[in-house]
Image: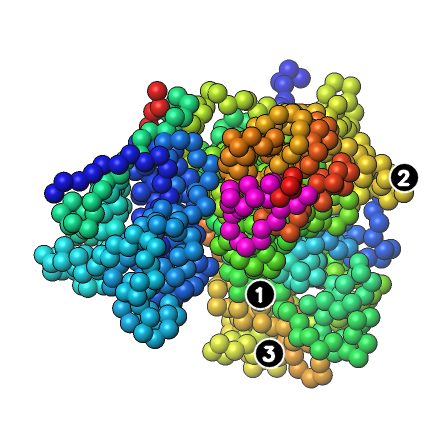
């Protein structure tokens, strides 16, 4: 062959692994998330050196050590703020924030909402396990009410966050949910998060098999998954159940569960999912019933709830600088030092 | 009318009024006017914490003190020669700071029954009428009435709008008294109100009315003149501390080629740095008004990690919030400049008043063994050099640096013989560009002779690596919890900071003999007061020297030897004794403290007495 190729070598998932021993508890959901992230990385079209993973504190936040990219394991709750400064100054980098429910919703809640409203083009991977794992088992801001933990022996009296409703409230431009136990779905959601231009909030249900085992079992295990998990697909009706026998219809602004087996409801009458519909997204995000409650309740949706395009902070920041330099010219240090009024002593 | 013209050497004027009276603007205009004549000066703006305390009350008084002289001056003066009191409260608050026999120019309208009551004068007491000011040269001027009169033709303006111009009347009058031209203030007004013609014209009218009033009324028999100061030849401008500091940062950015990223949260008295830097985007400056103090510093850490010049600015309470992130920056060993414009503490303390009470916080206020260089500015123009140095140390030694300034010099002004860009020392910065030949794997904590690790920024192929707040193995940077390694790393981080002493100038004496009776050892904004006091004592024949420390951590290598050459060491500070603790700790000397913790600067007179008491 005479042609000289300048294409970069084709990478595989293995190229994104480091020589550091992975130290999560055996059986932790984090292993699957790490594997899926490593799997999609070669395909996202970003050179390895342009990928940065920033984490805070918590079990999930060990993530950067296991990714052979640039990475920073920072301090509790602040990964979002560090990522904001990095992205503001280096817009060309692909910045991923790995955080947990305590890190991003409790101690770092403030930075999370402000990152979302500013819409930096970064990807937040929120590992939600509804418990504090690293500090060995206290309830978190997403733990259910009455939860008995080390710090709540008589049951928690805190009302939990619905993280995606919070993201919606902060005007996030991409909102999605996935789970550790569904590798394919998770890979798709990770790729979609990357592809979205703007702040992506991907909540990942992650099992902590030590302190909160089975928290999401009802959504992830074969027996219950079909009835409890609703997978959203763009342009498709909201149907679920083992034989796709159940659906959701809109009655005004209210969602209604319908039975598709008795012929009373036509497929055309069902709610058709539209990621671009701001109002429908709010209703979908509010489908947050306790899956263990008796009787009828809504399934928990998974997939992309909402996506919209909005100017990214770092781009506007760069544009403003360019415009100012274009109109005023590049700053002249001598002119600045001299100021407007001077006098001379001879 | 025949008038005398008297030549003066040194004048201190204080403009005082309600915080809505525009005294700061008046003072600044008089300052600029003075500076342009080549007269040396120093200013001290003093304003209330409240944006608008109730009108006419004592807490609502805002003051601007200006000293100007044909000799060099280093402080805004202990007592004033002239007090302009726009209302009764302003007189009451400032009476104790007027020299015996000093002039008081009182705005009669501000002394009506209501204003007297608001200023807590007892019923029936009228300070302008009862002879209590007999020891002063009192001039009563009905500024409000004269201002309204001057604006008779401006029928489109309401009374409120007319009254707003009364500070211009005072300014005009003072310009007349001190033989000044109105031109530069008229230019200023044109720039400020150019688009609002009525406001512009009315302000100019009142300014001129004040001037003409001085000329025509018989209340004033003398005009004064202060000649150019004997300063070293060169081109000067007037500069305030926060402004100089901002320029120092921009200059360092320009010289190092590192674009500025300022992550910050507004806080008094540091906000003006954000305001100033945000004006200069043409220098590629990025300013980020973060959601809180923590995001201010952590966003700056993110920017530094990406290869920018990360800066965060704050004051005491914000400094407290940034503490954990400073520890991260120490662990990451990346450049960062943390600027603390100190104010009175603890907690919210005295937000608009000055203090030097965060030195120990800067030194020790972090968890773990967490050494960081500390550097302090001593005058408004010195803020430029110190900011420039802070950047140099941060980027050349891969470390966060704390810069301490304070409210007094941040808002104070002085003439500045500004440098030219070409005169500034270059700041060389080298990012690691890739693996060197024979280098198989990147070692992020491999150190050079300064114990400094490489700055490897994301986007550099082959240098992918992970850093974090966990203890790490030296050289590889891998997480490591081994006991020996931790001790080694703690010692290494300390040694790295200590080594900076090899790259900073030796301590010099500001004045006085190298050996002798008394060394007055200061840091920060006490510079002017110490310098003036020491000069006065030296003139009286007292054997006293002055050293002022810019590099507080590490200290210059010769500081200990210098101190030991003196029988007595006096450490004046606007705190309860902080530098003195460190001096005693490091050098085992029996230094003595002089402390003033009133939210105001130490005066020359106080220090003269303190030195005399020490050697009595």
A70 above or below A112?
above
Q: Provide the secondary structure element on which disc 1 rests.
A: helix
Magenta-highlighted residues: B592-612
Identify the residue at image location x=18%, y=61%. B145
Callout 3 environment at 10 Å: few (<14), some (14 to 19), or many (20+)? some
Q: Provide the secondary structure element on which disc 2 rests.
A: helix
The image quadrant where one finds the N terminus of chain B is top left
**One can see residue B226 in this view:** yes
Q: Is residue B586 rendered to the left or right of residue A331?
A: right
Q: Which mark is residue B484?
A: 2
x and y, in percent, of residue B139 in the image: 25, 54
Q: Is residue B488 rendered to the left or right of residue B357?
A: right
Q: Which mark is residue A166?
A: 1
B339 above or below B58?
above
Query: In which image quadrant can residue B348 be found?
Result: bottom right
Tally of marks: 3
B227 above or below B115?
above
Q: In the rendered structure, the residue with mark 1 lies on which chain?
A: A
Q: In the rendered structure, the residue with mark 2 lies on which chain?
A: B
| Foreground of the two, B448 or A68 | B448
């Amino acid at each position: 062959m005479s042609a000289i190729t300048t294409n970069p070598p084709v990478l595989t998932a293995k190229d994104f692994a480091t020589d550091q021993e992975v130290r999560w508890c055996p059986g932790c959901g984090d292993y699957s998330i790490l594997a899926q992230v490593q799997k999609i990385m070669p395909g996202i079209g970003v050179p390895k050196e342009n990928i940065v993973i920033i984490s805070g504190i918590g079990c999930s936040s060990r993530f950067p050590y296991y990714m052979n990219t640039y990475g920073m394991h920072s301090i509790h709750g602040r990964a979002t703020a560090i990522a904001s400064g990095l992205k503001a100054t280096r817009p060309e980098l692909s910045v991923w924030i790995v955080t947990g429910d305590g890190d991003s919703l409790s101690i770092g809640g403030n930075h999370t909402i402000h990152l979302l409203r500013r819409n930096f083009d970064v990807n937040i991977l929120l590992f939600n396990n509804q418990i504090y794992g690293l500090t060995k088992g206290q309830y978190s801001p997403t733990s259910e009410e009455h939860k008995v933990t080390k710090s709540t022996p008589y049951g928690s009296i805190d009302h939990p966050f619905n993280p995606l409703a919070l993201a919606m409230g902060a005007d996030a431009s991409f909102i999605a949910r996935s789970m550790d136990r569904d590798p394919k779905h998770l890979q798709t959601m990770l790729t979609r998060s990357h592809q979205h231009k703007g702040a992506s909030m991907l909540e990942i249900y992650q099992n902590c098999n030590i302190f909160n085992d089975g928290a999401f079992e009802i959504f992830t295990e074969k027996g219950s998954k079909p009835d409890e998990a609703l997978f959203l697909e763009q342009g498709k009706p909201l149907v679920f159940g083992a034989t796709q026998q159940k659906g959701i219809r809109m009655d005004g602004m209210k969602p209604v569960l319908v039975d598709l087996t008795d012929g009373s409801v036509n497929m055309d009458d069902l709610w058709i999912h539209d990621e671009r519909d701001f109002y429908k997204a709010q209703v979908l995000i509010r489908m947050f019933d306790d899956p263990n409650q008796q009787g009828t309740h809504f399934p928990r949706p998974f997939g992309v709830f909402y996506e919209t395009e909005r100017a990214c902070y770092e781009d506007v920041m760069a544009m403003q600088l360019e415009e100012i330099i274009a109109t005023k010219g590049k700053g002249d240090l001598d002119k600045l030092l001299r100021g407007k009024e001077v006098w001379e002593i001879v | 009318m025949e008038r005398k013209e008297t030549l003066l050497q040194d004048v201190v004027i204080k403009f005082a009024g309600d915080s809505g009276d525009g005294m700061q603007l008046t003072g600044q205009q008089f300052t600029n006017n003075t500076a342009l004549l080549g007269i040396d000066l120093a200013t001290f703006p003093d304003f209330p914490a409240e944006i608008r305390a109730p009108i006419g009350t004592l807490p609502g008084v805002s003051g601007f003190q200006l000293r100007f002289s044909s000799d060099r001056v280093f402080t805004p003066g202990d007592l004033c020669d002239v007090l302009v009191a726009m209302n009764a409260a302003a007189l009451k608050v400032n009476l104790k700071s007027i020299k015996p026999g000093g002039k008081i120019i009182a705005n009669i309208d501000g002394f009506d029954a209501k204003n007297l009551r608001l200023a807590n004068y007892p019923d029936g007491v009228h300070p302008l009428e009862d002879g209590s000011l007999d020891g002063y040269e009192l001039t009563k001027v009905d500024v409000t009435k004269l201002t309204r009169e001057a604006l008779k033709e401006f029928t489109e303006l309401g009374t409120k709008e007319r009254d707003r111009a009364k500070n211009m009347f005072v300014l005009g009058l003072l310009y007349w008294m001190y033989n000044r031209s109105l031109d530069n203030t008229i230019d200023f007004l044109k720039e400020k109100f150019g688009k609002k013609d009525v406001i512009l014209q009315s302000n100019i009218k009142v300014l001129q009315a004040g001037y003409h009033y001085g000329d025509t009324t018989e209340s004033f028999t003398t005009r004064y003149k202060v000649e150019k100061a004997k300063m070293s030849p060169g081109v000067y401008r007037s500069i305030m501390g926060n402004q100089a500091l901002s320029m120092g940062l921009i200059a360092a950015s320009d010289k190092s080629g590192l674009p500025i990223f300022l992550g910050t949260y507004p806080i008094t008295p540091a906000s003006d740095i954000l305001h100033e830097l945000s004006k200069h985007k043409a220098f590629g400056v990025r300013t980020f008004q973060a959601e809180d103090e923590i995001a201010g510093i952590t966003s700056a850490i993110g920017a530094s990690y990406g290869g920018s010049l990360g800066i965060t600015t704050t004051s005491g309470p914000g400094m407290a919030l940034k503490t954990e992130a400073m520890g991260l920056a120490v662990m990451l060993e990346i450049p960062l400049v943390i600027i603390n414009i100190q104010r009175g503490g603890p907690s919210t303390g005295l937000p608009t008043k000055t203090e030097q009470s965060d030195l120990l916080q800067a030194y020790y206020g972090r968890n773990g063994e967490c050494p960081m260089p500390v550097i302090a500015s001593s005058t408004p123009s010195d803020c430029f050099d110190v900011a420039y140095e802070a950047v140099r140390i941060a980027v050349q030694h891969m470390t966060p640096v704390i810069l301490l300034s304070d409210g007094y010099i941040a808002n104070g002004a002085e003439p500045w013989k500004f440098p030219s860009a070409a005169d500034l020392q270059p700041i060389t910065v080298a990012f690691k560009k890739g693996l060197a030949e024979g280098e198989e794997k990147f070692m992020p904590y491999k150190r050079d002779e300064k114990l400094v690790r490489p700055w490897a920024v994301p986007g550099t192929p082959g240098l992918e690596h992970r850093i974090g707040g966990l203890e790490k193995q030296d050289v590889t940077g891998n997480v490591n919890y081994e006991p020996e390694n931790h001790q080694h790393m703690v010692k290494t981080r300390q040694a790295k900071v200590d080594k900076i002493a090899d790259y900073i100038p030796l301590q010099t004496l500001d004045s006085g003999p190298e050996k002798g009776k008394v060394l007055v050892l200061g840091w920060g904004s006490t510079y002017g007061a110490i310098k003036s006091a020491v000069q006065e004592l030296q003139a009286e024949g007292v054997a006293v020297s002055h050293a002022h420390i810019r590099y507080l951590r590490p200290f210059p290598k010769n500081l200990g030897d210098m101190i030991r050459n003196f029988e007595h060491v006096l450490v004046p500070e606007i705190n309860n004794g902080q530098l003195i603790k460190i001096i005693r700790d490091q050098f085992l000397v029996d230094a003595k403290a002089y402390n003033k913790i009133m939210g105001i600067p130490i005066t020359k007179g106080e220090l003269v007495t303190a030195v005399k008491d020490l050697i009595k």
